[in-house]
């Protein structure tokens, strides 16, 4: 039985723990959080009251002889924590996305884990969402021919949604802890992951972006464009784009975060639409207009994936199960450290483009560039927090209005707490 420890029992721990709770091969033996109350509440909720809590993660790692450690903390802590675990002899270290706040930290983690013979996983769960796995299978089988264009829209909605601890906003708004903003760098890693994986690419060529800071808080609304590298001279050009839409007044129930994703991929022989991810399973999923995957080809429209679970939690369960298996068999995790680093490069490019008001090339965002100061994501100017107030005031006002008009779901509450 593999012995597992978790560092950081904040919001996402509730989802990361699911794969371990149902595993026959791994067992959660200890958690560490410097907030003992949070850790205690989580263990109570998971039905693991007797599991040990450590305030100091180093003490947990030194004492518990762990096979796997899950690092679920703010981004600037991922590097030092992963390296400590690797040097202490933990066989498998899984780090929640993004891998780290800087490319320099990513590379150091990769180096140390390699030196110590440790398996390093970058935990990006969209890669395991059942509907996305189905879409990938169809694309790999040539459902729409050669892939030409990728587009993903993330809509940041007004909920109601899962309750999120406000303290988790503090570090996300600090560029030196987060590595970028809460939209494009933090949440965006999932979307950059889809832009590479679904399109069969390892990287992009160049990126251009437009980022607004309307609320003085979020790095959105924003639009990001890129080109994929051409493998052969005669290949058709391949493009991608990503939007973050800020819609705090949009009534949109979710069991998880208050956002959802819509993907469109065009190919030489057809088109594919992939509806919903984070909020999959809500009332939109139950309408005939939004099946999981829609493919147009040769004058025909077909629908796929209606038999699949449309609940975001399965992306976490599948990801954790894959990691347990990788540790048992000594195979590569999804993603490897190098792939995790690449996602950080991609996610930093839009900020550098916005700062310079020009295209940014893939090889301009490097640890060397960070040392020279040529690719540092800067804190946005004039962030006084008033936008945050404006944002929530507006979203509460709109929800109240919706309730008056007879909306069915009336609370900002997480359904699994009932
Ligand atoms: N995969 C996803 O969809 C997803 C969603 C949300 C968050 N995340 C990622 O998960 C990670 C954590 O995010 P979160 O939203 O749970 O954050 P959070 O702020 O809710 O939780 C972080 C926890 O770490 C603890 N912590 C901080 N410093 C510590 C230390 N030195 N030792 C022990 N514990 C410490 C805090 O007390 C807190 O409980 C981040 O990397 C984030 O980007 C991923």
Image: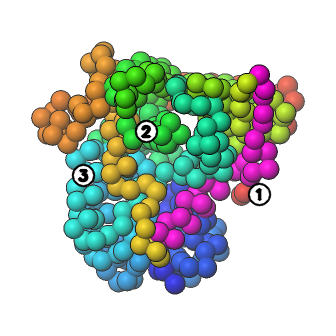
Residue 216 position within the rendered picture, expressed as x and y whole percent measured from the top left: 43, 25
Q: Give the range drawn in magenta.
A: 299-326
Q: Where is residue 115 in the image (x, y as percent from the top left)?
A: 22, 68
Q: How crowded is mark 1: few (under 14 residues within 10 Å), some or many (20 or more)?
A: few
Of pointers 3 and 2, the one earlier in the residue sequence = 3
User: Regarding mark 3 in the picture, which secondary structure is present there?
Assistant: helix
Q: Mark 1 points at which residue?
A: 418
From the viewer's perspective, is 183 left or right of 286? left
Residue that carries the numbered disc 3 in the rendered image: 107
**Residue 168 at x, y percent in the picture:** 47, 47
Residue most extreme to the top: 357
Q: Is mark 1 on a helix, strand or loop?
A: loop
Residue at left offset 26%, top offset 65%: 114
| Residue at image point 23% right, 63% down | 112
Question: In which quadrant of the rendered view does residue 291 lie?
Answer: top right
Q: Earlier in the sequence, mark 3 or mark 1?
A: 3
Q: Which of marks 1 and 2 is in front?
A: 2
Task: Evaluate whether residue 94 shows in this view.
Answer: no
- How crowded is the residue under tag 3: few (<14 C-alpha within 10 Å), some, or many (20+)? many
Q: Residue furthest front?
A: 234
Which residue was labeled with disc 2? 201
User: Which mark is first along the chain, 2 or 1?
Assistant: 2
Determine the residue positioned at 39% across, 83% down.
64
| Few, some or many residues within 10 Å of mark 2 (<14, 14–19, 20+) | some
> How far apart in space, not on screen, are marks 3 and 1 (Cα)?
43 Å
- Circle nearer the viewer, 3 or 1: 3
């Amino acid at each position: 039985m593999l012995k597992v420890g978790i560092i950081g029992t904040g919001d996402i721990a509730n989802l990361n723990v699911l794969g371990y709770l149902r595993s026959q091969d791994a067992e959660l033996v200890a958690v560490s959080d410097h907030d003992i109350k949070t850790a205690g509440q989580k263990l109570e909720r998971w039905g693991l009251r007797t599991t040990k809590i450590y305030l100091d993660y180093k003490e947990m790692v030194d004492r518990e002889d762990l096979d796997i450690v899950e690092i679920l903390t703010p981004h600037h802590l991922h590097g030092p924590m992963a390296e400590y675990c690797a040097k202490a002899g933990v066989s498998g270290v899984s780090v929640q996305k993004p891998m780290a706040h800087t490319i320099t930290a990513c590379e150091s983690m990769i180096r140390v884990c390699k030196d110590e013979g440790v398996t390093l996983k970058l935990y990006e769960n969209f890669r395991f969402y059942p509907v996305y796995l189905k879409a990938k299978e169809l694309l790999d089988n040539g459902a729409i021919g050669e892939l030409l264009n990728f587009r993903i829209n993330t809509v940041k909605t007004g909920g109601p949604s899962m309750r999120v601890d406000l303290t988790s906003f503090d570090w996300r708004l600090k560029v030196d802890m987060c590595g970028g903003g809460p939209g494009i760098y933090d949440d965006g890693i999932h979307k950059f992951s889809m832009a590479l994986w679904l399109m069969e690419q390892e990287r992009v060529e160049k990126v251009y972006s437009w980022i607004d800071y309307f609320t003085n808080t979020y790095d959105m609304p924003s639009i990001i464009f890129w080109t994929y590298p051409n493998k052969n001279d005669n290949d058709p050009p391949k493009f991608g784009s990503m939007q973050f839409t800020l819609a705090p007044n949009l009534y949109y129930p979710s069991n998880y975060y208050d956002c959802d994703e819509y993907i469109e991929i065009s190919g030489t022989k057809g088109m594919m639409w992939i509806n919903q991810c984070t909020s999959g399973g809500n009332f939109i999923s139950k309408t005939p207009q939004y099946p999981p995957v829609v493919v147009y080809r040769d004058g025909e429209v077909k629908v796929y994936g209606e038999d699949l679970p449309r609940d975001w939690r399965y992306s976490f369960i599948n990801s954790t199960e894959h990691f347990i298996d990788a540790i048992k068999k000594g195979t590569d995790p999804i993603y490897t450290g190098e792939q995790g680093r690449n996602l950080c490069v991609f996610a930093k490019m839009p900020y550098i483009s916005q700062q310079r008001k020009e295209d940014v090339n893939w090889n301009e965002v490097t640890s060397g560039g960070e040392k020279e100061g040529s690719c540092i994501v800067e804190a946005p100017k004039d962030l006084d927090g008033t936008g945050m107030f404006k944002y929530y005031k507006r979203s509460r006002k709109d929800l109240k209005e919706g309730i008056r008009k007879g909306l069915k779901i009336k609370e900002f509450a997480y359904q699994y707490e009932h």
